[in-house]
Image (cartoon, rainbow, N blue to C red):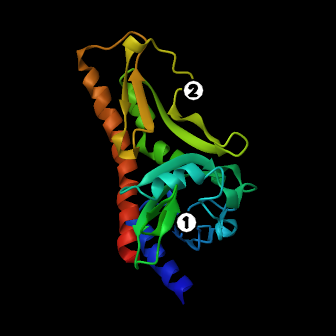
Amino acid sequence: SMVAKFAELTSNIKKDAKMEGILVNLQVAPMATVCYLHPVNNTEDFEPPTFMDNTGAIGHDLLTDPQRKFIARVTVPSDGVVIAGPLTLRQCSDCDPTVQTAFIARMAIDALSEKQVIHIDGIDYKKWGFAVALINFAELVDRSEIGERFAIRGLRYQLTRTDKNYNAETKEFDVKVNILAGDEDFDLDENFYVSIDLDTTNNLWNIKVGNDNGFVPSWKNSAVAATVTGALILSFMFMIICIENQIR
């Protein structure tokens, strides 16, 4: 059956990725509606008795959900991976706090026939749907030890992500900046830090690195560390590309 074949495919992708506890779910969403996912109940990436129940995501229409609408619309015409989050998972709002939220990486898959079209703002895009990966970002940051690397150099940092959620009352998208890692209160003078947009995610991710006394000439080491963070994000993009190629 298709369910069994998808489970076998995605199980191999997760295994080959060697990202246990980080890459926690893989999905496909034909016409932007979640249809197949694996694992359905994820017990392999969490310590017992914690598990991640994904059954509630099946049938989720990403283009009509106000909390997912903007990022789904951006994904359709995009040539690369689009990442949103951290977001509270629809399927797991009552789960253990460690599995309630995740980053969601999506890539649009080209249409397999002329009849497969997704309509956005009056424009027809020849797309089959999405390949989707759920990412346990907290675990990723923890394993990367990026905070410790900055601390050794006496540096503070803040990684942020700008999200847009559709407001049904105003018919507009509300902008929200989420702090993903680092200092909650990054209050350094602008002359005391560098700010780098991570181009891998359409400049919606930003990292600020600095210290209380300003930079010495070797400040570029901080930029290198920021690039490392970007590289961690890039690894997920290759994961989605693998999914797309396997589906085809």
* 223 vs 161, nearest the viewer: 161
Q: Amino acid at mark 2?
A: Glu
- Which residue reaches farthest bottom? 1
Please provide percent x and percent y for residue 23. Answer: 49, 59
Look at the picture and state if 35 lies above or below 104.
below
Q: Position of residue 229 (x, y in %)?
A: 38, 40
- Which residue is painted at 53% across and 86% down in the image? 2
- Residue furthest to the front in view is 122
Q: Which mark is residue 32?
A: 1
User: Any mark on residue 63, and which?
Assistant: none
Tag 1: amino acid: Ala
Mark 1 or mark 2, which has the lower sequence index? 1
Residue sitting at x 59%, y 74%? 35
**Residue 2 vs residue 149, the one in the foreground:** 2
Name the residue at the left extreme: 217
Q: Secondary structure at mark 1?
A: loop
Q: Quadrant of residue 197?
A: top left
Q: Dot 2 corresponds to which residue?
A: 184
Q: Is residue 155 visible?
A: no
Residue displayed at 56% across by 22% down: 185
Instruction: State the residue at coordinates (59%, 69%).
Output: 34
